[in-house]
Amino acid sequence: MQPAKSNWKVLGVMAAALALAGVGYAQAPSGQKPEPAGQAGPSTAAHTAKAEAPQQMMAARAGEYTRVIQFVNAAGPQGPPSLGSSKISVILDGHFLLEENSDVVFGKPVHGMRIYGYNNLTGQYEAAWMYTLSNAILMLTGSSNDGGKTVDYSGESVTADGEKLTLRAHFHQVDADQFVITIANVGEGGKEIPFQQTTYTRKK
């Protein structure tokens, strides 16, 4: 069965979603005075360099996974799921995670790379996503109320027509061997419209 045109439109939205210009904001840790612009005092440098609980929790995600990608809309799942694999590695002395994935989407190979981290100064989770359907990098920042078991990421993108898009990516750690990422567009009134859900299951 040939994929519906709407499926390729979804891929187009995903490619457009990766056209983002991100801006990072830094602040001093609570109770400390901000360092002068262009200077980093010993306390700031040490705080920034230390891998703490959020990084350690992310490090436990390292390993090899199968990926099941399901495109969805308001009517439910769209077409059969796409299958792939992912390798997640801890890099740079435990500060970041590197994900390298390879999928077959609607019969075509798609390769991607994602970097995840936690910024000790801003108290935010950060991510950079890129893949072979686009030359852009999607920059995301997120927050968590449960120590990283669930993280709500947000980023902004621009389509080829110049239309601005707000994207949300919701990360949920189901257990030690499985997590799910749901991606949604944000419509009028802040309503989220999911269009993709990816389930990662650790290979045994």
Image (cartoon, rainbow, N blue to C red):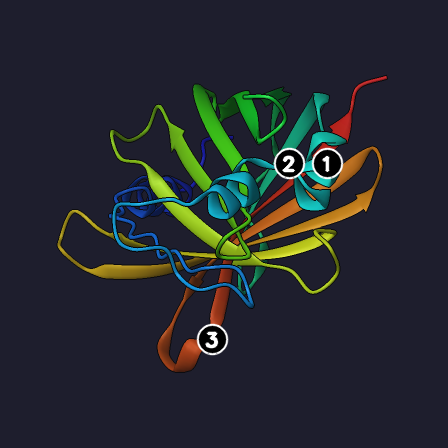
- Place residue 200 in its image quadrant: top right
On residue 191, the disc is 3
Q: Position of residue 94 (x, y in %)?
A: 63, 26
State if disc 1 and disc 3 touch (CB < 8 Å).
no
State if disc 2 and disc 1 touch (CB < 8 Å).
yes
Q: Mark 2 packing: few (<14 Cα in 10 Å), some, or many (20+)?
A: some
> Does label 2 or label 3 sit earlier along the sequence?
2
Instruction: Give the left or right position of residue 127, taking residue 96 as reference.
Output: left
State if disc 3 and disc 2 touch (CB < 8 Å).
no
Circle 1 residue: 56
Q: Which residue is drawn at 42% across and 43% down?
A: 7
Q: Between marks 2 and 3, how big is the CA–CA gap?
A: 35 Å
On residue 51, the disc is 2
Residue type (three-letter) at the residue carrying disc 2: Ala
Whether residue 140 appears in this view of the structure is yes
Task: Give the structural element (helix, strand or loop) at label 2.
Answer: loop
> Does label 1 or label 2 sit earlier along the sequence?
2
Which quadrant of the rendered structure holds the C terminus? top right
In this rendering, the label closer to the viewer, 2 or 3: 2
